[in-house]
Amino acid sequence: MTSVDPAEVQPSVGVVSAAADRGPLTMEAISISKNFRIGRHNTLHAVREVSFNLYRSAVVALVGESGSGKTTAARLLAGQERLTAGTIRLDGKPVDVGSRGAFRRYKSEVQLVFQDPFASLNPVHTVSHHLERPVRLHQAVTSKAQVRAEVIALLEQVRLTPAQQFLGKYPHELSGGQRQRVSFARALAARPSVLLADEPVSMLDVSIRLEMLALLNDLRQRLKLALLYITHDIASARYFADEILVMYAGRIVERGPAEELTQHPAHPYTQLLVASAPDPDDLGGMLRNGSGSAGQRPGSGGPAAVGCPFSPRCPFADDRCRADDPALVRVSSSRAAACWRLDVAAPDVLARSKGGDGDTTK
Amino acid sequence: MSVDGGFQLAGDGYSGADYPRSHGEAVLEISDLSVAYRTQAGDVRAVNQVSLDLRAGEVVGLVGESGSGKSTLAYGACRLLRAPALITGGSVRYRGRRMPRPVDILELTADQLTGLRWREIAIVFQSAMNALNPVLNVRDQMLDVIHAHVDVSRHEAMDKVGSLLDLVGIPRMRLRSYPHELSGGMRQRVMIAMALATDPEVVIMDEPTTALDVVVQREILAQIAELRHRLAFSILFITHDLSLLLEFADRIAVMYAGRLVEVATAGEIHHEAAHPYTMGLLNSFPSLHGPRRELAGIPGSPPDLLSPAPGCPFVPRCGYSRPACAEVDMSLTRVTSSTDPSHVTACPFVLPGESLSAGKPNLTVSVAEAGAEEVAQ
């Protein structure tokens, strides 16, 4: 049994992140929550008591459906939303984005890349304009020649070559993949240590996605970036991430090493996600059966307000699930899940962890 | 003519226009269709002599990258394009059960077209948010469609709207909801319900699930499959996601740079892909099930259709290219090694099943070994 550095144990769960071995801890989200008020009396709990760590040179994937709170979580980390509760720490220090100067210093460490490269670039500005501004703002370069050299270096970093050719181009002259590369370059212009990528490849063609992920992977290694990869595509997270966090209705319902979690999902929602991914080996399966994943009724409603949020859609739900919300509990030294019925939903995962490290859920 | 590897061309008689058809009546028969976009710099040949047919009750998947011309092909076949797009050649025959005789859609008058569209051929557009009218509620826009195309009383139309919503799994209490009050999945279901409002024989679906989550996507696809079983319409399903089609479509047509490069059953495409572009697509998506594979993707980007180079347009991105590729005429020829007589490819050189060459960009991210060890201990 290896000794575990107390700092690397997640406080709430006691699970060591599968990303921890890649590099030093940079960013910690400690029980962060975000509520939005809707109308006069309603509150939307967009993010509820979410905790995770990001490590240099490691990829943590945040996976979930739209509305699960993954983008809000990224915006909280980026300092673009105020926390309702919880703490974010960067390199051990609590994050302060109170003043303009502090926010700018924070942004030069933590950068966000958006999903839609068509909307995130300004159509009336050239590529070089998009990159010169962050270079001037975040790096101590002032002379025109230096800025230009830095911009060219950035374009080469994201493999937009020959860089000279791209400097004067406008967003509409670029393909979707090229635009997303410009977005990456813009984020890197601040020389960040943390990159938050919100669905960076979802808008791109399947054939281009892989190249983009390979590029991100390469940048992660070379620049020792701590990467948060937000996606609804759990299959890409399997290939790309070290650790996967599965979000549902604002909370993390399961976390674990990418390969293990996708091959042996414990939480019923993760099982649904895995079952829903296209399976080319199941040729004509959907046509033959005329039905989708097991036990799922279309339109069977949103998350429950009381009890486990997934209970209305869960084939294993019982009375306890409908009454009490399960907490995220440790399943093994690197995995945790929030489910009352793991013994029924994922007996194999429990058996593995029992045999493996003598640890049980409760 | 014999080329390396013993691959035989199936004779000179085969061209894109008359590749062998298996049994089953073709409902929609696109022959040699060409569409160009007139620009100041010249014609962009977005669709280039494409022939494809859709048989009764069949799901044909049309796959390709953005800009490959797949939407232009489908919209061109229904004459839904407007200037600067111009249909420069070909024919589109439609044989409906309700039609006394086959018609060439490209020859129809405006009135005849109105009768054909939606009544016979309906389209589910890609972006439900843009395709739905934001100031009409669900019920009113569905009534609109029904009254515009079918002669029924208001009462009958209301009944129809209700049963259509049941069909796609939307509770009737949402009848008076406006598009912005619905989730993305629900909007897409409304679009599908509207397409089915007039019992069409052909439904063209243009990336109907691209903007949706995998879970919702699967629910909707399962629903489409079930509806097709019950209502027996044919589907032309346009997407850039081949992994989806392998599971969903009967036959798959692969499009690249305005041309079809391969057509075959889903099983053939999966196991016996004969065109390097198809192989590249197959090698592009990470799989969730089964062992982790080395993924290669397709490096480079699609060609400029304004000034196409002679021969095969895939050459700059192809791992198998050779000098003779510049003379390939891109007609579809039968893959003789295949048991499927409808399997055709535009590449005369590559053998099905040939593995992709090494030395391409790989996404090889090793599993978090550390995490795996932790569990093992």
Image (cartoon, coloured by chain):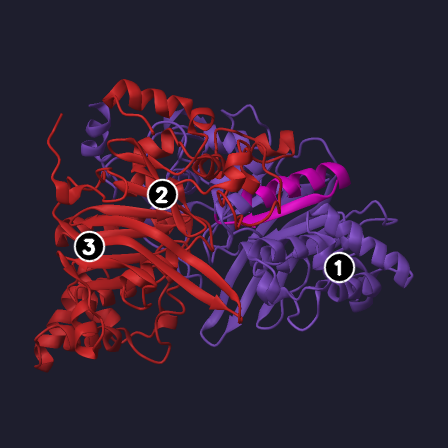
Location of residue A78 in the rendering, given as x and y in whole percent from the top left corner: 27, 64
- Which chain letter matches label 3? A
Residues tagged by mark 3 and mark 2 found on one chain of the structure? yes
Q: Along the horizontal axis of the image, is A288 left or right of A33?
A: right
Mark nearer the viewer, 3 or 2: 3
Location of residue A301 in the rendering, given as x and y in whole percent from the top left corner: 59, 48
Q: Which chain is red?
A: A
Label 3 vs label 2: CA separation? 23 Å
Q: Along the horizontal axis of the image, is B114 left or right of A118?
A: right
Main SS type for the magenta part? helix
Mark nearer the viewer, 3 or 1: 3
Residue A119 quadrant: bottom left
Of the numbered discs 3 and 2, the one sitting upstream in the chain is 3
Amino acid type of disc 2? Ser
Residue, disc 2 = A236
In front: A296, or A129?
A296
Amino acid type of disc 3? Met
Location of residue A213 in the rendering, given as x and y in whole percent from the top left corner: 29, 49
Residue, disc 1 = B117
Q: Say what secondary structure mark 2 lies in.
A: helix
Quarter of the C terminus of chain B within the rendering: top left
Task: Judge whether residue B293 can be spotted in this image.
Answer: no
Is A2 colored magenta in this rendering? no
